[in-house]
Image (tube, rainbow, N blue to C red):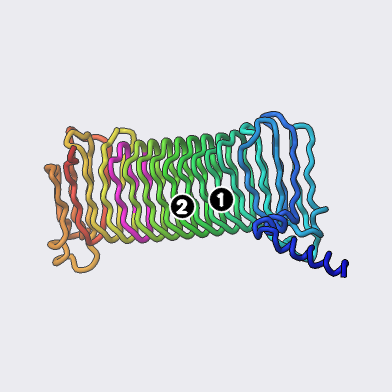
């Protein structure tokens, strides 16, 4: 009887434990923690076969590692070591389970001034807070999230999205299967995806952006911009330098640039506003609209095989504009249907029956750099740019 009473008392005591406390005990199972004393400008190296990695700023002189969600049978496969000012975290689960049994997660806090190199084959990578250092990382099956990093960033994923806040430095970001969203980079940015959209709010210096299957939307770029997509639209704000824009299946819109603009699309319209410099714009199936302030440093060419062209230049611009409409089909009726119209007086104008072309030349303010306009079975307008 005494033994039975003891068993009953034990069961009642266990049931009286708050539900939250029971849950905490379960969560602590499979947890390993360790703290390392370090100095600033050290390095954290994380290499795990599976699991999420999250880095946050913490103590000025410590690296704190908390690994959780690891199966008990794999805890001995976790290595947390230190060599000089470098801390290493490694996790290689036993084979036969594809390295995943549970949901491993690595929460690591580091000094503000610290470098990070992290790799995982099956989880997300995240760096949050004010971290100052070189950040590199790769994952084969997760998302990348970064915010408030000062330094160089080089991150890649083969199966997720990339979400980035502010980076005070240069950034190299790539994914093979997701979107890229980047708010602000003070330095240069190189972003690439094989299967998603790209959105960048601002880049302080040079921008390289490329996708094989989505739209690209860019805000302001402080240097030159090289932007291309094989399957979407391209929209760019102000570029303080040369701009090279490419798409095989969409429209191109550029709101401003200082330098040489090169824009081409095989299946959309091109709209270029507030361009100071020169333009090379080509489309096989759309219209071209452009505002150009020539600088005398290079000729321009606007060419489409099937759309209207509308060019606006300042009244005081020094330029020589040559415009041609090629007529494909019945010359007689179509030569009356299409025309070259301008706010400027033509130096010469002709409807050529032999070549089946409508040609006009405009010499503005004594002439200057050449601007060539060409279309087929469409109209050309040359207007004075409104201030």
Quadrant in which residue 43 is drawn: top right
Task: Tell me the chief SS of the magenta region.
Answer: strand
Q: Give the range drawn in magenta.
A: 260-282
Magenta region includes residue 128:
no
Neighbor class of circle 2 (other Cα within 10 Å; few <14, some 14-19, many 20+) is: many
Nearer-the-camera pick, 262 or 143: 143
The residue furthest front is 1
Q: SS class of the residue under badge 1?
A: strand
Q: Which residue is drawn at 24% across and 34% down?
A: 368
Quadrant in which residue 29 is drawn: bottom right
Q: Mark 2 points at which residue?
A: 198
Q: Where is residue 237 in the image (x, y as percent from the top left)?
A: 35, 44
Q: Where is residue 173 in the image (x, y as percent from the top left)?
A: 55, 47
Q: Where is residue 314 in the image (x, y as percent from the top left)?
A: 20, 37
Magenta region includes residue 272:
yes
Residue 305 seen: yes
Q: Name the residue under label 1.
A: 174
Nearer-the-camera pick, 333 or 316: 316
Image quarter hosting the N terminus: bottom right
Image quarter hosting the C terminus: top left
- Is 75 positioned to the left or the right of 145 in the image? right
Q: Where is residue 78 in the image (x, y as percent from the top left)?
A: 79, 50
Q: Is residue 18 above or below residue 313?
A: below
Nearer-the-camera pick, 346 or 304: 304
Q: Is residue 195 above or below residue 33?
A: below
Residue 121 seen: no
Q: SS class of the residue under badge 2?
A: strand
Nearest to N terminus: mark 1 or mark 2: 1
- Is 163 positioned to the left or the right of 81 in the image? left
């Amino acid at each position: 009887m005494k033994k039975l009473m003891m068993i009953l008392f034990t069961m009642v005591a266990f049931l009286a434990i708050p539900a939250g406390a029971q849950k905490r005990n379960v969560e602590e199972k499979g947890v390993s923690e360790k703290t390392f004393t370090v100095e600033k400008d050290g390095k954290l190296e994380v290499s795990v076969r599976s699991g999420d990695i999250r880095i946050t700023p913490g103590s000025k002189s410590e690296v704190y590692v908390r690994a959780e969600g690891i199966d008990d049978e794999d805890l001995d496969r976790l290595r947390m070591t230190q060599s000089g000012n470098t801390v290493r975290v490694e996790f290689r689960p036993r084979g036969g389970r594809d390295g995943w049994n549970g949901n491993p997660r690595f929460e690591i806090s580091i000094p503000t001034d610290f470098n990070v190199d992290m790799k995982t084959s099956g989880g997300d990578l995240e760096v949050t807070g004010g971290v100052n250092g070189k950040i590199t990382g790769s994952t084969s099956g997760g998302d990348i999230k970064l915010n408030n990093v000062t330094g160089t960033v080089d991150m890649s994923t083969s199966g997720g999205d990339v979400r980035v806040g502010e980076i005070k430095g240069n950034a190299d970001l790539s994914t093979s299967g997701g979107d890229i969203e980047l708010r602000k980079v003070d330095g240069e940015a190189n972003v690439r995806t094989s299967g998603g959209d790209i959105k960048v709010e601002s880049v302080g210096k040079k921008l390289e952006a490329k996708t094989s299957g989505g739209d690209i939307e860019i805000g302001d770029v402080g240097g030159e911009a090289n932007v291309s997509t094989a399957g979407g639209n391209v929209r760019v704000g102000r570029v303080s330098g040369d701009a090279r824009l490419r798409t095989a299946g969409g429209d191109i819109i550029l709101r401003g640039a200082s330098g040489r603009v090169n824009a081409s699309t095989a299946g959309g319209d091109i709209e270029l506003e507030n361009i100071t410099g020169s333009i090379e714009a080509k489309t096989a199936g759309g219209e071209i609209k452009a505002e150009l302030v020539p600088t005398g440093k290079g000729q321009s060419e606007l060419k489409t095989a099937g759309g209207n062209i509308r060019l606006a230049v300042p009244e005081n611009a020094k330029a020589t504009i040559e415009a041609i409409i090629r007529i494909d089909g019945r010359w007689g009726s179509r030569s009356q249907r299409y025309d070259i119209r301008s706010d400027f007086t033509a130096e010469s104008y002709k409807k050529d029956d032999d070549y089946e072309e409508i040609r006009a030349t405009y010499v503005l303010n004594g002439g200057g750099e050449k601007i060539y306009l060409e279309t087929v079975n469409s109209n050309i307008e040359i207007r004075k740019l409104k201030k």
